[in-house]
Image (tube, helix red, strand yellow):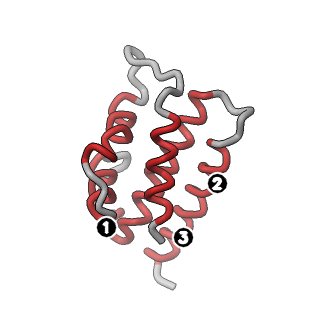
Amino acid sequence: MTDATTKSQGRRTLADSFMRDAQRESTPWRSRADLAFEAVYLYALTMLGEQADDYEHPDTRVLTAAAEKCNMTAEEIGPAVEYLAHRFDPAIPDNGSAYQVLLSIAKLLGSDR
């Protein structure tokens, strides 16, 4: 097994775990959105394989490259790109409203095995 394969499998396992945690009703909405985003990002890295190491993380290009690879449109991946851009911006607090759309994106990226 190559190093890239081992990394990809580890990322997928971690993303799957984040997906489960994001769907726990006892978790606050903001945390659920963060967990869903982490799953999106890790599934994107998994899709890129060895190319994932070419980026400094986090990087919106990871999201757009993975979207392109699985034929998602810029509009479909856009909410994840936006979430990353403003994730820690105190002027734009997120109350978890992005949760559902991030979860949908994660499911799309995670289903491409």
Q: Amino acid at mark 2?
A: Ser
Q: Which residue is mark 1?
A: 51
Residue 104 point in image, percent of width and height = 48, 47
Disc assigned to residue 40: none
What is the secondary structure assignment of the residue under circle 3? helix
Label tally: 3
Q: Which residue is mark 2?
A: 17
Side (left or right) of 64 relative to 23: left
Q: Which residue is mark 3?
A: 9
**Pick the front one: 33 or 59:** 33
Looking at this view, name the residue that lies furthest to the bottom: 1
The image shows residue 75, relative to residue 30, as above or below, that is: below
Residue 54 point in image, percent of width and height = 29, 62
N-terminal of the pair, mark 1 or mark 3, is: 3
Q: Residues under labels 3 and 2: Cα distance?
A: 12 Å
Q: Amino acid at mark 1?
A: Gln
